[in-house]
Image (tube, rainbow, N blue to C red):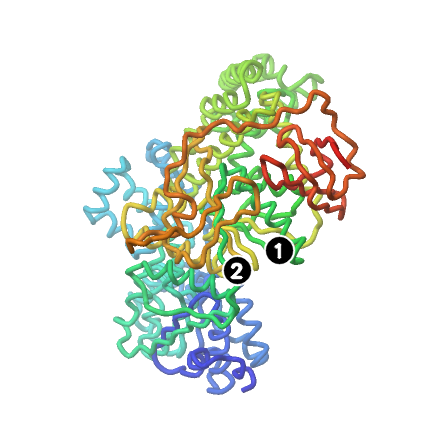
Amino acid sequence: MDYLSSLNEPQYEGVVNTEGPAMIIAGAGSGKTRVLTYRIAYLIKEKHVDPFNILSLTFTNKAAREMRERIEGVVGNDARNLWMGTFHSVFARILRSEADRLGYPSNFTIYDTDDSKSLIKAIVKEFGLDDKVYKPNTVLSRISGAKNRLVSWQEYIANPLYQADDESAMKPEMGRIYKAYCMRCFKANAMDFDDLLFNTNVLFRDHVDVLNKYQHRFKYVLVDEFQDTNVSQYTITKKLSAVSQNIAVVGDDAQSIYAFRGASIDNILNFEKDFPDLKVIKLEQNYRSTQNIVKAANSVIARNKSQLKKTVWTSNSDGSQIELIKSVSDNEEGRFVASAVFEQKAQKGYKNSDFAVLYRTNSQSRAIEEALRKAGIAYKIYGGLSFYQRKEIKDLMAYLRYAINTDDEQAFRRIINLPKRGIGNTTVEKIVVAAFEHDIPLWEVLENVDQFLPGRAANAVRDFVVLVKSFRIYADTKDAYETASHIAKHSGLMKELYDDKTIEGLNRYENVQELLNAIKEYVDTPEVEDKSIGAFLQEIALLTDQDNDKDQDTDFVTLMSIHASKGLEFSNVFIVGMEEDLFPSQMMLSSRADLEEERRLFYVAITRAKENLYFSYALSRYRFGRLQNCEMSRFIDEVDPSFLRVNTRYGSRQPQLTRPENPSGVSSSYARSLVSKRKPAPKKPLQYHKPSADFVPSDTSGLQVGMKVEHPKFGYGKVNRMDVQGANRKANVIFENFGEKTLLLSFAKLRIVES
């Protein structure tokens, strides 16, 4: 049993106590995956349990694959006989075998999200309902929520509470759509993803012999990430383990962050009520992080009332204190991140892949991306697209491109029927063919559409032409922000996104708002002379084109939402946007349960860091096209102040305060005192340097440390450090009034004053 020798005492206990119900509460970084895999290996190798009698449920195929490989390393090929996989894959396998019991063929189709939305769209149309009210995303989300709570369409229609909710939401026909959707799926011999769970529950409820068969087959049931299970998933696993009682769940209530997907933290909090003989094992030693990080995380999560008590600890070194950064704006916040990454790599030899930037909403990536690009630092968006590659961003950008260049065929194809205006693919192809056959621009065909298309199609195209002409007038006479705002509104894109009230729809709407924020900030920048939409598009095109020049390797700074980061770890972590109404989200302040989920999300973010952790917030941030003052997040107040320190290395605007004396003994928050309790003074425009009369940029090929230079915006400074590795030569300059800046010499305009 050499594989057990590396386990600590609680881990060992979690592996060898295989009989009866067990709950393994695994703190962050405590080695839960090792315990789960070794427990299964122990059952097979030491207890001689047939792998066919073991059911192991996970949430991702990747997790299942990695666990199986680890187990195979201990027990050999027997691991291949395990019933191991995601909830959906395992229960689909069962349903394939038992489909006839539910009236399905064994080869039933599994609908993906797009299939489901298309079917809902068709039903709404057939019912003669307003598709702007009954949007596929909204309807599917409502149906999915009902199924995950095991509410059938029959129960949904019969329950007056659901009817009242739908009527108050101005969607009284939701129940009828739910019924039609289920009937149509059944008629098509199809199940959607939620049906794989819902129908497994129906199978076990209505066919006791089938349930009995699987209860005796699965003598041991193990569930990973148990805190993320919903009602449907837990009901199935509870039934399957009812005979043997050999159920082991592994999870951490402090990392339950998926309520918006239907996860119920009550499953783990109340697990002991369903299994009174439960053995609870706590994995409390953190092997990942420094003591400062672990203790800071503990001080935060201790404020939650709904939790299973545990004390996570580590024998690792104290490590550095968490650095607290105050930035003037979100753009300065992005520059701070880029500067810190650059310096840490230079001083300590970190790779790009040792860094992660975590944010509450995906739209926050824009300022970070732009700063990293300008610094020549490779990055990738994890679990999502680059900001400028997201569909909603590309849609609006296509409108902006077409407003200044009506010969842009790709932009034309993207926007001609977006939002839908009755111009189908056939019409588009006729327009394109006519342009080629007559060797004339697309726009000329559009302006003379009556010569090429019949009446109805021509009418829709004429309306489109009028719309684009109005956009061209704005582009010719207004600045970039006025033009973009006008087009976003009058194209119909913003309304379509605003009307979609799902989480995905809200994120898309917020992303477009963030693009408008970027354009507003571009226009408000004093040194930008050409404020037209054409100039903005050119700058963005230059930025995004740099992505194609990156090395084809895995050395990237990782940018991701905090939700996407769970289960990962990095040497250096930046948690940006630590501001009230952003994190915690304004949408999560209506109840204690919601706020506690946000606090768990903060806990997850903190515990991703191994060595260095940064909290960052901005005093101002562009939101909805306006520069808004921001307030530091309450969550920073909740961190024990002994683990925090103010960062003063990047820029001159960081506060340089010390711990205040408190002779009266009155309790106060040191964290907030670090950044001053006073409300910020009204914002004044930044007073940039006025270049010398004889200012002419110098040839910087011979620039060296110690030289005095002049920058057209930052003024006079002294070269502190040079980085001449690779194609992107950089200089670190300490300016008299703007502090430390790292500049790309190929772009920076520097005049050498003294050598």
Q: Residue at x 49, y 19 (%)?
A: 460
35 and 372: which one is in front?
372
Residue 100 image point, x, y percent = 39, 63
Q: Pick out the residue farthest to the front.
A: 663
Residue 645 image point, x, y percent = 48, 53
What residue does disc 2 label? 320
581 and 731: which one is in front?
731
Mark nearer the viewer, 2 or 1:
2
* Relative to 41, residue 724 above or below: above
Q: Pick out the residue farthest to the left.
A: 160
* Relative to 40, residue 470 above or below: above
Which class describes the residues within 10 Å of circle 2: few (<14), some (14-19), or many (20+)?
Answer: some
40 and 651: which one is in front?
651
Q: CA distance from mark 2 to mark 1?
A: 20 Å
User: Which residue type carries mark 2?
Assistant: Ser
Image quarter where the C terminus lies is: top right
Residue 455 visible in image = no
Q: Pick out the residue farthest to the right.
A: 702
Residue 343 image point, x, y percent = 63, 50
198 and 575: which one is in front?
575
Image quarter where the N terminus lies is: bottom right
Which class describes the residues within 10 Å of circle 1: few (<14), some (14-19), or many (20+)?
Answer: some
Residue 339 image point, x, y percent = 61, 45
Question: Does residue 626 appear to the left or right of 164 in the view shown?
Answer: right
User: Which residue type carries mark 1?
Assistant: Ser
Q: Which of the 4 image quadrants contains residue 87? A: bottom left
Q: Which of the 4 image quadrants contains residue 215? A: bottom left
Q: Which mark is residue 353?
A: 1
* Relative to 15, residue 196 above or below: above
Question: Does residue 746 appear to the left or right of 506 in the view shown?
Answer: right
